[in-house]
Amino acid sequence: MKKNLYILQVLALLLVPVLFSSCSSGIAPKPNPKQTASIKGVHVNPYKEGTYAHFTASSSYPKTYGIYRNEALISSTNGSNAKVIVDRGLQRGLLLNNGQVAMDYPVSTGNRNFPTPAGKYEVLKKKRSEKRSNLYGKIYDIDGNVVKTNADSSKDAIPEGGRFEGALMSYWMRISWDGVGMHKGKVPRYPASHGCIRTYYKAVDTVYSKVAVGTPVVVR
């Protein structure tokens, strides 16, 4: 028994320098490179393809020019059940059928100098073609050359013999007597208009055909 105790004491004395050396060396063990390598995350859409949830969960939404279309809902959408929501933050428009999203499409609302006012509106008037702005457009000289683009007829002078031509706003859907409406136009993926709601050319015909005078429009 005493012999065994003696052996244990000797072993303990031999281990002390080893432990002291490892604790005081200050050298950290090298990490496993497999544990420190960064891993690039991959976006995984958890929703069923073809659903509206899948569309909005896409990594490219809302900046995409893509359009979500529920053809079954679109076919039954009309002036009695339609509603339009314009989301200025997302720069997207929603065509609803009894509260369900029939179509989600790109829009471009007013820029910082001419913001589209939020509020509850309704379609007041519709005109498919030959509608031009009486305020914004281009100024031509007497020879027909454009001398100013993005002109404001209330501020910019027209040269002698020249003319002002308002910007074309086909598929016009007026929602305010102050000049705000939805219409076909260039739709960059940011607010760029003079206050109107420019609607993407691949969606505007559907919106125009499904709303009626009196259809609610919410700008938020």
Image: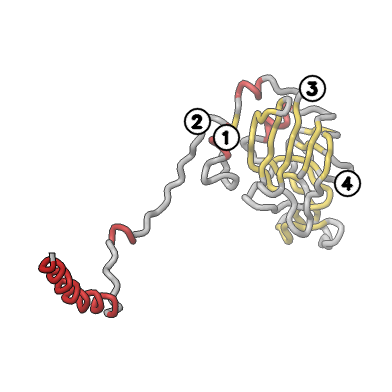
- Which residue: 81% across, 49% down? 117
**Residue 159 position in % (x across, y down):** 82, 62
> Label 4, on which residue?
178
In front of the other: 129 or 54: 54
- Evaluate whether residue 142 shows in this view: no
First reached walking from the N terminus: tag 1 or tag 3: 1
Crowding around mark 2 (Cα neighbors within 10 Å: few <14, some 14 to 19, many 20+) is few
Crowding around mark 3 (Cα neighbors within 10 Å: few <14, some 14 to 19, many 20+) is few
Residue 70, compared with residue 163, is above or below; it is above
- Which residue: 58% across, 39% down? 56
For residue 127, side relative to residue 101 (left or right):
right
First reached walking from the N terminus: tag 4 or tag 2: 2
Q: CA distance from mark 1 to mark 3?
A: 26 Å
In front of the other: 154 or 7: 7
In front of the other: 149 or 50: 50
First reached walking from the N terminus: tag 2 or tag 1: 2
**Residue 94 position in % (x across, y down):** 69, 36
> Label 1, on which residue?
53
Hey, which quadrant is residue 155 in on the image? bottom right
| Secondary structure category for the residue under label 1 | helix
Crowding around mark 4 (Cα neighbors within 10 Å: few <14, some 14 to 19, many 20+) is few
**Residue 12 position in % (x across, y down):** 19, 72
- Which residue: 13% across, 71% down? 6
- Evaluate whether residue 115 shows in this view: yes
Q: CA distance from mark 3 to mark 2?
A: 30 Å
Residue 45, compared with residue 138, is above or below; it is above
- On residue 48, the disc is 2
> Label 3, on which residue?
80
